[in-house]
Amino acid sequence: QVQLVESGGGLVQPGGSLRLSCAASGFIFNIYAMGWYRQAPGKQRELVASITSGGSTAYADFVKGRFTISRDNAKNTVILQMNSLKPEDTAVYYCFRYKGGTYDWGQGTQVTVSS
């Protein structure tokens, strides 16, 4: 079955960096769009970044210039490099696979930005 396993979250100071990874299995990875959502306490889940099977990327305005999404099709992995982190980036970050209007989700990884 489809499995998406996130890692790399943690506690970081404002201005710091984190690298999130999503290991995918159970499907043909390189034909699907992938990406990341996040959900902060008391807020709705919001799209952070996505990457198509061909490698085209899209970002939410609030992370443009700070976050970079990439994929390694040989390793079935999606990476979210997060730089210049702000306290408002604190959230649980979820990896997703997009398939024909539906989403598969990972369990999430907590990112906390605090001094």
Image (cartoon, rainbow, N blue to C red):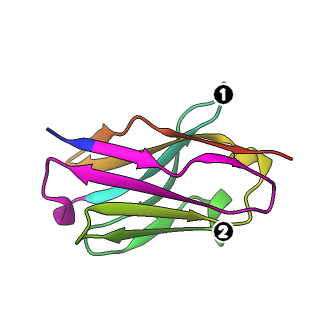
Q: Is residue 84 left or right of residue 2?
A: right
Residue under circle 2?
66
Q: Amino acid at mark 2?
A: Arg
- Image quadrant for the N terminus? top left
Q: Residues within 10 Å of mark 1 (few under 14, many from 20)?
A: few
Q: Secondary structure at mark 1?
A: loop
Q: Is residue 15 left or right of residue 92?
A: right
Residue 67 vs 86, above or below: the answer is: below
60 or 88, which lies in front? 88
Residue 56 vs 63, above or below: the answer is: below
Q: Is residue 19 left or right of residue 22?
A: right
State which quadrant residue 114 falls in. top right
Label 2 vs 1, first from the N-terminus: 1
State which quadrant residue 14 falls in. bottom right
Whole-percent x and y of residue 104? 28, 40
Span shown in magenta: 4-32
Residue under circle 1?
41
Whole-percent x and y of residue 86? 77, 54
Q: Secondary structure at mark 2?
A: loop
Which residue sits at x=37%, y=61%? 78
Which residue sits at x=25%, y=62%? 76
Check if residue 108 falls in the magenta segment: no
Which residue sits at x=35%, y=44%? 5
Q: Amino acid at mark 1?
A: Pro
Whole-percent x and y of residue 27? 13, 51
Which residue sits at x=68%, y=63%? 17
Residue 80 vs 43, above or below: the answer is: below
59 or 85, which lies in front? 85
